[in-house]
Amino acid sequence: MKRKLSIVCISFLLLLTGCIPTLDRGEEEIIVVEQTEETEEQHFVITPTIDTPENYYRNLLPDGIYHRSEARGTVAHTMNNRIDMNQFELGLMEIATARYSQEDFYFQEGELLTGNTINSWLRRYNPNEDRYRFGLNPPLGEGDDLEEQMRKSPIVLSHVMEHNYVQRNDDGEIMLGGIVIGLSLNSVYYFRTEDEEGRYYFHEEPIEPEDAEAAGKEMAEQVVERIRARDGLENVPITIALYQEERRGAIVPGTFISMAHISGEDAFINDWEEINEQFFFFPSSNARTVHPNLSNSFGQFKDEVEEFFGRSMGIVGKGRYKNDALDELTIEFNLQSHGKAEIIALTQFVSGKVSSLFTFDAPINVYINSVNGPEAIIIQYPGEDPYIHVYK
């Protein structure tokens, strides 16, 4: 897990075509690892820092190439919607920031868990068959037919995702500094059965959140035990988080519900930290009930924009709340026919309304799209001038 560094040099500025021009960009760093009897010389490229409020991790690229996880792709077949897929991956990186600072650690996609390993963990447990003896999901329940057996024992775990964080220590060595594991849990178990004539029947079985979380924590214990049993990983810190998916077709993503950190000295999970995170869709009856003030502001914003535009428009919002406080608001426009001058005027008008109607201390992202694709974006951070871009 270590590589000795012999040369460190600063190379050139990375040119990011099409990115926000006002952002400060760092420099790309190239590391040359000297050849030894055991290994060949290898180059590592550390991607530049881009000064954004999100403060994304820099990437460590072996031989200057981005290495995708061998397990990437399995997630598309196990999670129920694209909204959850995106939130699961980005949220897992955000969770990592609590333990692995962006200044000291570099990001790499998981290299320890293969696709075969993850698939074996996603299966139902059956100690009598090699194919199923590593399964983390429960075996079939009791019942007179397969549907009843599956309903009584729904599959909870839908995906496992691994992220790695590497660092350089005081001796100039590259080493694995931490492993972050995400366990994604079903809120609804979707399954099918087949009759004797080959006809399929599709079913769904809701899973109580408390049951999913309890099962997820038991699975997490086994995951940590399996990682600790691997050579070279006995003392690597591990962070593990549970993600509760939304049901299929949901318009907002699920949320992370709890996390645990296992230090390099520990072999087991000692305690869990609850995560208070929620998403709300605007306009909706749920948002009006729980967050009436923002709902009223959003309604006024939508009315004034549609009055300016002269017709009804597809305007929706998604609010992310952390610890019961608004953390981010995203607004999306979906337009039909339009002219470029109309888009420019609309963008200018919307930018002014964002500043005057939404006065809370949280970022606002506005995406104006049409049938032809993206038309304009407005990014407003608290206390800063908005960034506005109209696509040509």
Image (cartoon, grey):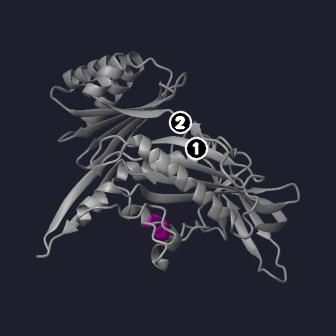
Residue most extreme to the bottom:
37
Horizontal and vertical percent for residue 125?
Answer: 46, 67
Dot 2 corresponds to which residue?
A: 275
Q: Quadrant of residue 192?
A: bottom left
In the rendered view, would you say 285 is above or below 170?
Answer: above
Horizontal and vertical percent for residue 267?
Answer: 71, 55
Residue at 41% from the left image edge and 54% from the top image edge: 156
**Residue sitting nearer the eye, 216 or 89:** 216
In the rendered view, would you say 256 is above or below 196?
Answer: above
Decide whether residue 122 is among the magenta residues: yes
Marks 2 and 1: CB-CB under 8 Å?
A: yes
Q: Main secondary structure of the magenta part?
A: helix
Q: CA distance from mark 2 to mark 1?
A: 7 Å
As shown in the figure, which amino acid type bears the numbered disc 2?
Ile
- Which quarter shows the N terminus? bottom right
Residue at 74% from the left image edge and 74% from the top image edge: 42
Closer to the N terminus: mark 2 or mark 1?
1
Residue at 69% from the left image edge and 69% from the top image edge: 230
Task: Rate crowding at label 2 as few (under 14), some (14 to 19) or many (20 or more) other CA atoms within 10 Å.
Answer: some
Q: Can residue 15 be seen?
A: no
Q: Can residue 153 be seen?
A: yes
**Residue sitting nearer the eye, 231 or 171:** 231
Q: Which mark is residue 259?
A: 1
Horizontal and vertical percent for residue 117?
Answer: 53, 71
Residue at 20% from the left image edge and 27% from the top image edge: 309
As shown in the figure, which amino acid type bears the numbered disc 1?
Met
Q: Quadrant of residue 253?
A: top left
Q: Which structural element holds mark 2?
A: loop
Q: Over which residues does the magenta segment extend?
A: 119-123
